[in-house]
Structure formats: C-alpha cells, structure tokens
Image (spheres, coloured by chain):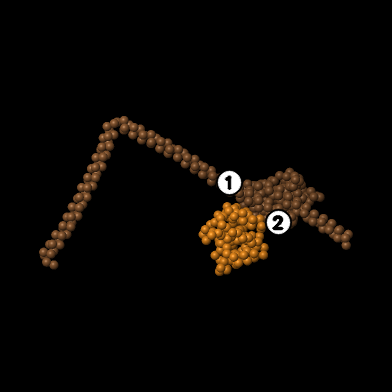
Chain colours: A brown, B orange
Amino acid sequence: MSEQDRLSTRAEDFLALFNKGAEFTRELLKENERLRGRLAAVTDRQESAARNPGDWDKLRHELMTRIATLEEECTTVRERLDQVELENSQFAQRYVEVEEENNNLANLYVSSYQLHSTLDMTEVLRIITEIVINLIGAEVFAVYLIDGEKSELQPVISEGMELSAFPKANLGAGVLGKAVASNETTCWDTQRSDDLSQPIVCVPLVVQNRPIGAIAVYGLLAQKDGFTALDHELFNMLGGHAATAIFAARLYSQSERKLNTIQGFIDLLTK
Amino acid sequence: MGHRILIVEDSPTMRQLLVFALRRLKEIEIVEAQDGMDGLRKVSSDHFDLALIDINMPVMDGLKLISLIRGDESLKEIPIVVITTEGANEDRRRALELGANEYLCKPIQANQVLTVVKGLLKAE
C-alpha cells in the first residue's frame, strides 16, 4: 500500500470518529434540553405552591394525617400479628393435646373392643394379658379371680413369673385383698416390687359393684419409668370392661354346660 | 402413589392399635399377618414398602423372619421396623444386626409409630 493510501485510510477513520463524537454531542444537547424542561416544570410547581402558604399547610397536614393513620394501622397490624402468633401457639398446644387424647381413645377403644370380642374365658384372659403387657407396659403381673366359696383371690394367669409363685389373698386382707374389698384401684409410683404381697398396682375387677377379681402388677418393663394419664384410664377401663368380659365368658360357659346337660337329657328321653 | 405396609404381629390388640395409628397416613394400604410364617408368605407374594415386625411370635419369630427377608435378593431392600417388649435387650440388638432399620419398644405410642414410619417411607 502506498503512503497516500495509508493517509487516506487514516483520514477516513478520523472522519468516522469525528462523526460519532458529533452524534454523541447532539444527543447530550437533546438530553440537556429535556432536563431543563423538567426543571422548569418543577420550579413552576414549587413557585405555584409557594404563592399560597395555605396549600403547604394543607399538604403538610394531609401528610401528617396520613403518617398518623399508617402508624396506627402498623400498631394494629403488629397487635394482630402478636394475637395470631399467640393463637397459633395455643392451636399447636391444643393439637398436641388432641393428638394425645386421640391416641388414648384409640388405646381404650382397641382394648375394650378386644375384651368384648370373645366369650371364651381363656381368650379373655389372654387379651387382658396382652393389654397389660402391650398397652400398660407391665412385665410381672397376675390376674386374680375370686373363688366364690372361699372369698379368696386366686391367681389364674400370670406373666413374668410362674403362676404358682403368686400368693393367694383373702378379701379385705393385705394390699390386694383390701384394694378389692374397697373397690379402689391402688397405684404406687414405683417401677418394681419384689415382695409378691406388695403389688405396685391393684386393679379390682368389678361387675355391678360386686368384685370378681383383680389385676396385680409387680413390675414394669425396663423402659417404662412411671404411670401416665393413659395408664390410669386403662386401669379404670380394665376394672370395668375386663370384669364384664370375664363375667360374660363365665355365664356363657355355664349356659353351654347347662345346654349340653339338657340336650343330653332330652336325647336320653327321646331315644 | 400410596404405600403398602405389612404388620407382622401375633397380638390382635397390637395389630389393631398399629392399624389405628397408621391409618392417619394418607394413601396407605395395610396388610396384617399373625405370625412370622404368615408374614413371610405375604411379603414374598406381594410388594411392600415397609414391614413392622414383632419379635416374639409363634410359628416363626421376628428375628427369623428378618433374616429370611434380608437374605432374599428381591426382598432385602424393604425397610423393617422391629417391635420389641424390652427396652435394651438382646433381641433388639440382634434385630438391628440382622438388618432391621428401626425399633419401637412396647408400650408403643401412635405418634412414635408415625414418626418412624414416615421417616423410613420418605427415605425410601
């Protein structure tokens, strides 16, 4: 490329740069004009307002009123928020209580449902055992029934120890006998008793105010460290429902025996 | 999609109580088995997302059932919750060694069951 061509190219570059600068300057001037216009408009509005001081006061008053209203609203909203938070906490607490109540009711329902699901004495005693182990958490216990003739409490089923290890008890004598005679559930807040004459829980089994037996608990499972409200509800439920289930099973067994006897007698007569 | 849970427990009282607790979960199907053998039959013939297994059962105990489930290639991934009577006994340790994921001690609370089951179903 010759020297002249190079100069020509540089001149063209310079001209393009110059044109861009000119364009930018035009845009700046235009923007400057627009801002001047806006400034003039603002000045006009200010001057117009300043001409009447009453307008300023009115505007100020309006703004102050608005601020006061907003502050009031803010206070109300804060109070409402505190109230909602309190309600929320109360609802959460209530939810926990309802859950617990629901759980307790489910336990009671299942227990009473199972107790009344059979008329077989062995089955009833097995269900009582299941409830005392699984729902109450007892490890050592026995179910006693009153021998009608002797007024004596005899163990009929046990868990945790051999049945023969559990002593008989007379009505009105000893911890168990007294609890049954007075028809009052007794409960000591302790985990275990090695003395079989001193159960930690005595639940009299009562039908129509007549004692028919008792559940005596001597030891709780290792992880069970005390009695809950549900345990006491279960004791009450067992005192009534287990007794009724045992009573019904006994009646059914007696009626079955009588029916068989009568049937045998009829067969003897008719053959 | 719902979950299927198998309860293997010989006590009808406990089974009913577990069903009551689990029914609170949405879209859940519960199948009951009354001993280990019944449990094995049901878990082998159908799909389950979780199994609750009692330890002390007639016919086949829970420990045996867990070992059979964990030894079966098609069943070994099923999360297992063990239900034990004692708090810290040998059975619980053995069940965990055999591959049980969690354990619950009797007397069990519905909310404990739900927490454990939800946790395992979520982690599945």
Mark 1 crowdedness (10 Å alpha carbons): few <14, some 14-19, many ≥20: few
Residue labelled with disc 2 = A126
Q: Is residue A96 above or below residue B118?
A: above
| For residue A70, side relative to residue A232 (left or right) | left
Could you say which is closer to the camera, residue A13 or residue A259? A13
How far across and down, in percent of the image, does residue A137 sit?
64, 53
Classify residue A75 by image quadrant: top left
Letter of the chain that mark 1 sits on in the rendering: A
> Which residue is painted at 70% across and 54% down in the image?
A117
Upstream in sequence: badge 2 or badge 1: 1
Residue labelled with disc 1 = A97
Instruction: Find the distance from the CA under tag 2 to the CA under tag 1.
Output: 32 Å
Could you say which is closer to the camera, residue A170 or residue B1? B1
Can see residue B93? no
Callout 1: SS: helix
- Count up the numbered dots: 2
Mark 2 crowdedness (10 Å alpha carbons): few <14, some 14-19, many ≥20: some
How far across and down, in percent of the image, does residue A27 sit?
22, 50
Q: Amino acid at mark 2?
A: Arg
Q: Amino acid at mark 1?
A: Glu
Q: Is residue B22 above or below residue A36?
A: below
Callout 2: SS: helix
Disc 2 to disc 1: CB gap under 8 Å: no
Could you say which is closer to the camera, residue A190 or residue A22? A22
How far across and down, in percent of the image, does residue B91 sit?
61, 61
> Which residue is painted at 67% across and 63% down in the image?
B58
